Image (cartoon, rainbow, N blue to C red):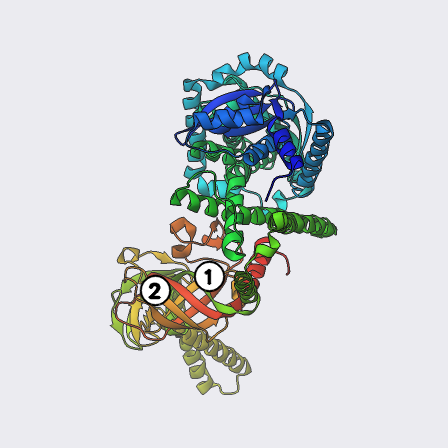
């Protein structure tokens, strides 16, 4: 088959094309993972590009003098035995022109560049619309301002100040940790903290904090020799603040300098949070200063943990991790690698190989990061939106959160699906898909979706429990009379007693005095009655004597009734066992001779084989627990053995006090606070008591032992669990 003259002419024309790099580009040589790379800065668009050594060699030949054929021959001469085709060189040159780094001498190149500019502008607008919680609007070039400020803050970048700041932050953490109970007690309630007044504080504070934050980035970038040419407004989580573009740090050869620049914002916010911790601690509660400092503490802490310091979000922590791992564009490369895996193994499409051989650890890192960062963006977005819904619902503004949620759903689900479809469709890949793999992938995806909504899994309510004797198997012996003193104890703690056995004797001086007075009064009235009866024998018709006799008889009857009542009360001072069982919680003998208030517990007589594990559950769990449900109980100190149990009782009203062993003050799990009036520990949140009776009691079980309980409350789907979790977390009815 012969080649036509037109084809030969076209081939020669392509070889003679000259490409010229823009002369204003800034280039820095760097090393990543033991290889040499060149970072090229576009000072107009403030974009940065990384090229390998061979690519940069070709770029140097694109000077407007060498043709593509010249560049190809020089490349093959230097990197022999590597071969470079004209098509590959044209593709590389096309990429340079598409990014705006190079120009060519072909007609219409200016029009092509304008079309690329419009395309980038559309992509920028699309990126803004698909990320409603993070919108940037560039405003000024702050380079001169930062140059004037740098001499005044240069001391911040010294080792002594860094050590001071570390000590300052640790002191704030120790202050909170050592006064944790006081810290919790001083925290306002949910409805008090998340009020409109607090929202205004947070709105203003976030703006001020972010201004200081971005100046921290900018000044650190200037300190290590970078340029900062872009600063503007940032809409972060619907709150206005500033941002500072320090991407010039990519030109710095020292990766630790880049890490410091990336971590500067985190450092600033942690210092602000530490300062506000001390101010909040010293300020009077519920004052403007106290509320403002608490708001800033929460904002700086949450923004550092959830946003800035978290590498799963594309904020400061992300760039610190990327520099530390020496992987620029970590997120894009991870997403691209995961997308290629999906197209290759799920759809059967051949994808281009990675530019260099990756280790197994690097592949695992890319896949893990791509999946976790995507899921985390879902989590953070919907936590914010559901919080907004909870906050705005009482004001009938919940529709705002719904609208934002719809936009978030489109950005997190629709846009990635569109990108995957576009990648599959590109270069005619749709016909290249293997039907078998597509069918298997679709079947697996559909099965997983159906499993989420239709397949139930066992659900258990878990909690820390205290082993106690069941209420119906417990008999309390208490002080019955006011003014009684403990005179004698007849039993020991743990002693087995029978019903009616004497347990203790009390002494009541007031009651004894009343008894003696009653005896003396009856004796006096009896003597008077005897005298009157003697007089009536001699004068039976004496009317006044008979009236006096009737009065005395009434008095004696009342005194005898009083004597019987006093005797009953005296008998009650001898305390006897109301049932067979074991003595428990006996008052120590050091209490002998002391005054006991009425109702003071002297001891209990318990049936030690009737044991139950008592735990406190929150309202959402109480709604699932039903009497008769089966449970598993594991006791501390007895290994990993489990005992079966049955839910025997569920309190209908919330618990007013918490057993000390279950309180967080004693190492338990229930947050409590002291009730100074009742001298008990009451739960900070609503809880209900649930008793789980042991099906079989063994000798190793004793009251007062802690353990863990798992109550089997039924089978529920994963969709139901997620729905319930969100409804519980944000107190909304789903």
Q: Nearer the viewer, residue 180 or 225?
A: 225
Residue at the front extreme, as displayed: 2
Q: Secondary structure at mark 1?
A: strand
Q: Nearer the viewer, residue 602 or 404?
A: 404
User: Which mark is in front, 2 or 1?
Assistant: 2
Q: Position of residue 499 (x, y in %)?
A: 31, 77
Which quadrant of the structure image shows residue 596? bottom left
Q: Quadrant of residue 524?
A: bottom left
* Side of 589 where 196 appears, left or right: right
Compared across the picture, whether 643 is left or right of 249 comes to left
Neighbor class of circle 1 (other Cα within 10 Å; few <14, some 14-19, many 20+) is many
Q: Where residue 91 sits: x, y (%)?
A: 58, 35
**SS of the residue at dot 2?**
strand
Which image quadrant for residue 516? bottom left
723 and 595: which one is in front?
723
> Is residue 387 at all visible to an observer of this figure?
no
Sequence-wise, the earlier of marks 2 and 1 is 1
Q: Does residue 447 appear anywhere in the picture?
A: yes
Query: Which mark identifies residue 363?
Result: none
Q: Which corner quadrant holds the N terminus? A: top right
Q: Position of residue 473 (x, y in %)?
A: 37, 74
Q: On screen, 257 above or below 617?
A: above
Q: What residue sits right under mark 2 in the picture?
A: 634
Query: Which quarter of the figure is the C terminus placed in?
Result: bottom right
Against 509, residue 18 (above or below) is: above
For this view, does 372 lie left or right of residue 133?
A: left
Residue closer to the observer: 2 or 308: 2
Pointer 1 residue: 616
**C-alpha separation, residue under disc 2 versus residue under disc 1:** 16 Å
Q: Position of residue 111 (x, y in %)?
A: 74, 30
**Total marks drawn?**
2
Measuring 43% from the left and 45% from the top, which residue is drawn there?
363
């Amino acid at each position: 088959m012969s080649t036509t003259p037109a084809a030969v002419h076209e081939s020669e024309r392509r070889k003679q094309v000259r490409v010229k790099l823009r002369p204003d580009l800034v280039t820095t040589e760097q090393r990543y993972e033991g290889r040499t790379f060149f970072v090229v800065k576009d000072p107009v668009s403030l974009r940065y590009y990384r090229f390998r050594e061979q690519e940069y060699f070709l770029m140097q030949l694109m000077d407007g003098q060498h043709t593509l054929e010249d560049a190809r021959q020089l490349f093959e001469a230097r990197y022999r035995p590597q071969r470079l085709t004209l098509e590959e060189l044209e593709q590389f040159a096309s990429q340079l022109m598409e990014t705006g780094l190079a120009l060519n001498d072909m007609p219409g190149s200016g029009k092509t560049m304008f079309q690329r500019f419009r395309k980038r502008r559309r992509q920028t607008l699309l990126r803004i619309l698909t990320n409603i919680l993070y919108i940037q609007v560039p405003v000024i070039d702050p380079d001169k301002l930062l140059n004037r400020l740098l001499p005044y803050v240069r001391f911040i970048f010294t080792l002594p100040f860094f050590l001071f700041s570390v000590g300052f932050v640790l002191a704030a953490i120790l202050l909170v940790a050592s006064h944790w109970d006081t810290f919790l007690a001083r925290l306002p309630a949910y409805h008090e903290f998340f009020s409109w007044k607090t929202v205004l504080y947070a709105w203003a504070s976030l703006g001020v904090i972010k201004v200081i934050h971005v100046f921290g980035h900018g000044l650190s970038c200037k300190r290590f020799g970078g340029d900062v040419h872009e600063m503007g407004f940032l809409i972060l989580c619907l709150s206005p603040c500033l941002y500072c573009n320090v991407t010039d740090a990519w030109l710095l050869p020292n990766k630790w300098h880049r890490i410091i620049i990336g971590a500067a914002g985190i450092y600033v916010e942690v210092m602000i949070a530490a300062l506000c911790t001390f101010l909040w601690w010293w300020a009077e509660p519920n004052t403007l200063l106290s509320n403002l400092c608490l708001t800033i503490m929460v904002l700086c802490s949450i923004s550092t943990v959830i946003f800035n310091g978290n590498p799963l979000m594309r904020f400061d922590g992300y760039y610190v991790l990327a520099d530390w791992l020496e992987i620029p564009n970590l997120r894009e490369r991870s997403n691209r690698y995961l997308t290629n895996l999906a197209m290759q193994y799920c759809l059967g499409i051949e994808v281009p190989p990675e530019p260099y051989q990756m280790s197994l650890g690097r592949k695992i890192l890319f896949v893990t990061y791509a999946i976790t960062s995507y899921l985390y963006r879902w989590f953070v977005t919907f936590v914010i939106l559901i919080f907004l819904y909870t906050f705005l619902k009482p004001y009938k503004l919940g529709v705002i959160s719904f609208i934002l949620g719809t936009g978030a759903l489109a950005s997190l689900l629709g846009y990635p699906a569109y990108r995957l479809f576009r990648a599959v469709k590109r270069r005619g890949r749709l016909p290249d898909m293997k039907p078998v793999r597509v069918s298997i992938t679709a079947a697996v995806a559909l099965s997983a979706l159906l499993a989420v909504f239709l397949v139930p899994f066992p659900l258990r309510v878990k909690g820390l429990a205290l082993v106690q004797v069941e209420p119906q198997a417990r008999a309390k012996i208490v002080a019955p009379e006011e003014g009684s003193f403990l005179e004698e104890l007849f039993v020991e703690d743990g002693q087995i007693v029978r019903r009616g056995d004497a347990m203790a004797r009390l002494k009541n001086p007031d009651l004894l005095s009343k008894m003696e007075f009653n005896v003396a009064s009856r004796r006096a009235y009896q003597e008077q009655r005897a005298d009157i009866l003697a007089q009536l024998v001699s004068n039976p018709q004496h009317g006044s004597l008979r009236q006096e006799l009737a009065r005395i008889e009434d008095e004696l009857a009342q005194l005898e009734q009083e004597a019987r009542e006093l005797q009953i009360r005296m008998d009650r001072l001898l305390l006897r066992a109301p049932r067979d069982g074991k003595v428990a919680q006996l008052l120590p003998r050091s209490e002998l001779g002391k005054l006991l208030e009425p109702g003071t517990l002297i001891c209990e007589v318990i049936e030690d084989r009737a044991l139950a594990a008592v735990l406190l559950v929150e309202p959402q769990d109480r709604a699932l627990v039903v009497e008769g449900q089966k449970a598993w109980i594991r006791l501390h100190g007895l290994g990993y053995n489990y005992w079966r149990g049955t839910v025997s009782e569920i309190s209908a009203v919330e618990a007013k006090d918490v057993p000390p062993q279950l309180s967080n003050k004693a190492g338990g799990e229930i947050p409590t606070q002291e009730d100074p009036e009742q001298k008990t520990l009451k739960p900070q949140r609503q809880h209900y008591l649930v008793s789980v009776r042991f099906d079989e009691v063994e000798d190793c079980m004793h009251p007062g032992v802690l353990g863990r309980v798992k109550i089997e409350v039924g089978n529920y789907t994963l969709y139901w669990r997620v729905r319930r979790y969100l409804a519980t977390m944000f107190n909304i009815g789903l």
